[in-house]
Image (tube, rainbow, N blue to C red):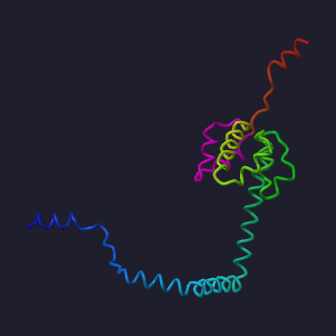
Amino acid sequence: EEQKAAAAKAHEPLVKMPHIELSEVKKFAADWRQNRKEKEAQVEAQIQAFFAANPLVISVILGISAVVYVFLSVCFWLICRKTHIAPGPLVWVPFLQLIPLLRAANMPRVWFFAYFIPIINIIPIIILSIKIVKSRGKSPWVAFLWILPLTTPFAFLYLAFSRSAPIQIATHEVLSLETA
C-alpha cells in the first residue's frame, strides 16, 4: 500500500495548474475584442490623472533623466580624452555622441549610420568596443564585457574612469633623432 501511495505521489505534478475552461477563454477574448478601446482609454485616463495629480513624479523622473544624461556625456568625454582625442561639442548632443567615439576609435564617420540599421548595428558595436579598448590600452576582455548587456555599465565606467593609456612614441623615431 505504501508503494501504491509513493507511485501515485510520483505521478502527481509538482505544481497543480488551475483548470481553465475553453468557454471562459473564449468569453474573455470576445469581451476583450469588444471593450478593448474602452479599457485602453480607461487605463490611459488613469495614467494621465496620476501624473496630473503628482507633478512631483514628473519632476523627479525628468531630474533623474537629466543627471543620468550628463553623467553619460561626461563618461563619453572622458573616454575620448583618454584616447588622446578632443571630443568637441558633439559629445554633449544625444545620438551624435557616437561621432566623437568613432573618432576616438579611429573609425570612419560612415559607421555612424550603421548604428541605426537593426541587426547590422551589432557589427559596429563590436568593432567600436574592440578599437576603443585597444586605444585605451586595456585588456581585450574589457571589449567583451562592454558588448555583453549585463556587464556593459561596468566596462563603460571602467573605460571612463581608469587611467589613460600612455602615449606611444615609436622607438625608431627617437633613435633617428639621437643619431642625427
What residue sits 64% from the left and 42% below the top?
Answer: 143
Q: Is residue 150 left or right of residue 108?
A: left
Q: Is residue 55 left or right of residue 25?
A: right
Give the quarter of the image for residue 81: top right
Inspect the magenta stretch and tell me whether residue 13 lies in it. Answer: no
What residue sits 71% from the left and 85% below the top?
Answer: 52
Asked if residue 154 is positioned above or below residue 166 in the image, the reply reads below
Estimate the x, y position of residue 146 in percent, counting from the top left. 63, 47
The dominant secondary structure in magenta is helix
Asked if residue 125 is positioned above or below residue 10 in the image, the reply reads above
Which region of the structure is painted magenta? 137-163
Estimate the x, y position of residue 75 in percent, counting from the top left. 75, 51
Indicate the quadrant containing the N terminus: top left, top right, bottom left or bottom right. bottom left
What residue sits 84% from the left and 53% below the top?
Answer: 90
Give the quarter of the image for residue 140: top right
Indicate the quadrant containing the C terminus: top left, top right, bottom left or bottom right. top right
Give the quarter of the image for residue 145: top right
Inspect the magenta stretch and tell me whether residue 147 lies in it. Answer: yes
Residue that lies at the very extreme toward the left in this rendered image: 1
